[in-house]
Image (cartoon, helix red, strand yellow):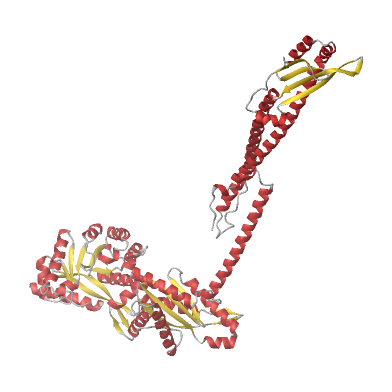
Amino acid sequence: MQNSFEVEHRLGSRILRWILAVALISGIVVSTVQVVLDARRVSAVLDNDARQTIAMIKDAATQAVFSIDSDLAQQVVDGLFAKQSVHMARIVHPDGTPLGERSRPLLEAAFRPLTDPIFEDERQFREPLSREANPDMVYGYLDVHYDTAPAANTWLDRAAVTFASGIATALILGMVLFYVFHLLLTRPLLRIVASVKQVDPAHPDDRLVTTPSGHQSDELGLWVNATNNLLVAIGDSQKRHQEAEDRVSRLSRYDQLTGLPSRDTFMELLVRDIEEANKRGVQLSLIVCGIDDFKSINEQCGFRSGDLILQTIADRLTSKLDNARFTIARLGSDQFVIVEKGLRDGFQAADTADRILACISEPMLVEDQSIAMTATMGVALYPSDTGQADRLLQCAEQTMTLAKQNGQNHFQFYVASIDQEIRDRKQLEKDLAKALANHQFHLVYQPQINLESKRVIGAEALLRWEHPIRGLVPPDLFIPVAEANGSIVEIGQWVLDQACWQAARWASDGAPLRIAVNLSAVQLRQNTIVEDVLDTLRRHNIPAGRLELEVTETSFMTNLSDAVAKLHRLHQAGISIAVDDFGTGYSSLTYLKQMPVQHLKIDKQFIRDLLVNEEDTRIANTIIDLGKSLNLSVVAEGVETAEQEYYLSQRGCKLAQGYYFSKPLSPRDFETFVKGFHQQIVENNA
């Protein structure tokens, strides 16, 4: 509890009271001494004056009494009354008979009760009268009574002045002393107090006490230095205490061996991560990683080697996985746990699991031994598997235990269907990575028909994957995978190269057809895509006008300005640009106005139910009318019936492709189809 700084608590006020009291008492004492001394002096002066006066008139008084001359005696007596202080005077014979006498009353004054006890009300003097010739013979006496009031009045005035000046001098000196004391002590102390009040008790050594100016080498300076030394010592003690508490807390919250959060700390972090994921509406994955056959490592190489292996794995995980996206902890023994935040889907979790497996499986040098470790992991997803933190960890731990029963160096998802889906996806990625090198890809070509001239004017190159085990893999299955892992860039370049080679061959055989190639969004984002396309055309000696690149509406949405700029460069080189699957994406006129588009391709889902589904028919009509208004050619995909072909032709759709004309064909079959189709047109016209 802090005392308030009231006036009575201030040192300055106490010092002022003491100084004033001492000064006042000292002034009174000194003045009293001066007044007493002055009173003694006045009394002595009064006596001396009387003796001098008596000495002056003694001869005349002696003559008067010797000659018994009353007149002379009276004259002597009257002469004494010239002095104001003479109260009574007389000359008497030895027998007491007065020869000359006179008196006047004592001076009445208010101060007499004060001065009479000091000086008496009157002073009486008697002088024997004798002649020098016979000094032993006394002829009479001279009696003189002095009134002390005049001298007392003068003394009293001086005493008042002495008291007033003495007390005033003492008070002034006291105030001067107080001011000096304030300058030298009180004010510096107040500044020290103000500086002390600014010291932070939690961090006393952050802001030390400031030494008042001019007091660096005196007692106050020494006191401030001693106080600062004490504050620094207290701060150091607090820091050591806090460090000790932190170490204790860290020992309880973090694993001593690896420095990773312990199980209890991890659960707190997991609850926080789940709350954050719930707020953002995203997923997260929890991976429990168990080192395979770790017990045998301890038995063969010793516990020290086992500890070094665990430390190495922990260091690898923290260095490979970004702290912002991953929470890593050690559950105990040979088990680690990893939480990945901001997850897109389970496939991303599988990629992370693969990275962790690869990270752990790298050989490590432990006490001059090269040791290769593997791990088995269980993966649980939030919120699809469970929404509770403890249950999520339990799911992953159970899955890891189950996975260890089925082998080592792999991961397994908690839900079997998801696990199988992701395993199929991972296997597909592995197979896809080898497909191009193993020549498993080939192109087929679907004719594009001009509905006005009824002639084949071009072909769309379509990619096919002939898997050695699974057979023909649908493009809808492997193309998204290739786009996700980036392999579509290499595959797309191969497709472009093959299509241009085929177009050059057909042109040399007298069939200069336009070739349409799909351009993936991933390819369009490549900085060198324009140069790659133009180099391919030059390499196969194909005119730019004979190539058409098909892009989807979503392919240029991520970076519209960059995509539009690249498409403009391709168009300026003479290449045609078509928007594929129009109507299924954003379908914004703003994008169409910015893009150098020549063709709109109506998605086959709108053609499939043409003339059957009223809504699809309206959409197809709208796209055809839009193409006309923008002076764009409209290509209908998926035409399967004569009624659809006829309706589209009547509505003004210029181009079409679909099973009604032909399915996608190999190059040889395509050549045969073109010849037969044109021959049939000639025969029909004939």
* Quarter of the image that includes the N terminus: bottom right
Figure quadrant of residue 24: top right
Q: 529 or 69, which lies in front?
A: 69
Q: Is residue 486 at all visible to an observer of this figure?
A: no
Q: 73 or 413, which lies in front?
A: 73
Image position of 549 (left or right of 651): right
**Residue 252: % across, % down:** 53, 75
**Residue 659: % across, % down:** 17, 77
Q: Compared to 286, does 93 lie above or below?
A: above
**Residue 123: % across, % down:** 75, 25
Q: 298 or 88, which lies in front?
A: 88
Image position of 155 (left or right of 372): right
Seen from this angle, which residue lies furthest left?
Answer: 686
Image position of 148 (left or right of 397): right
**Residue 648: % across, % down:** 12, 69
Q: Is residue 635 at all visible to an observer of this figure?
A: yes
Seen from this angle, which residue lies furthest right?
Answer: 133
Residue found at x 44% / y 68%: 324
Q: Compared to 31, does 380 lie above or below?
A: below
Q: Compared to 34, does 95 lie above or below?
A: above
Q: 206 or 650, which lies in front?
A: 206
Image position of 522 (left or right of 579): right
* Quarter of the image that includes the C terminus: bottom left
Count of numbered tags: 0
Figure quadrant of residue 226: bottom right
Figure quadrant of residue 407: bottom left
Q: Compared to 71, does 228 lie above or below?
A: below
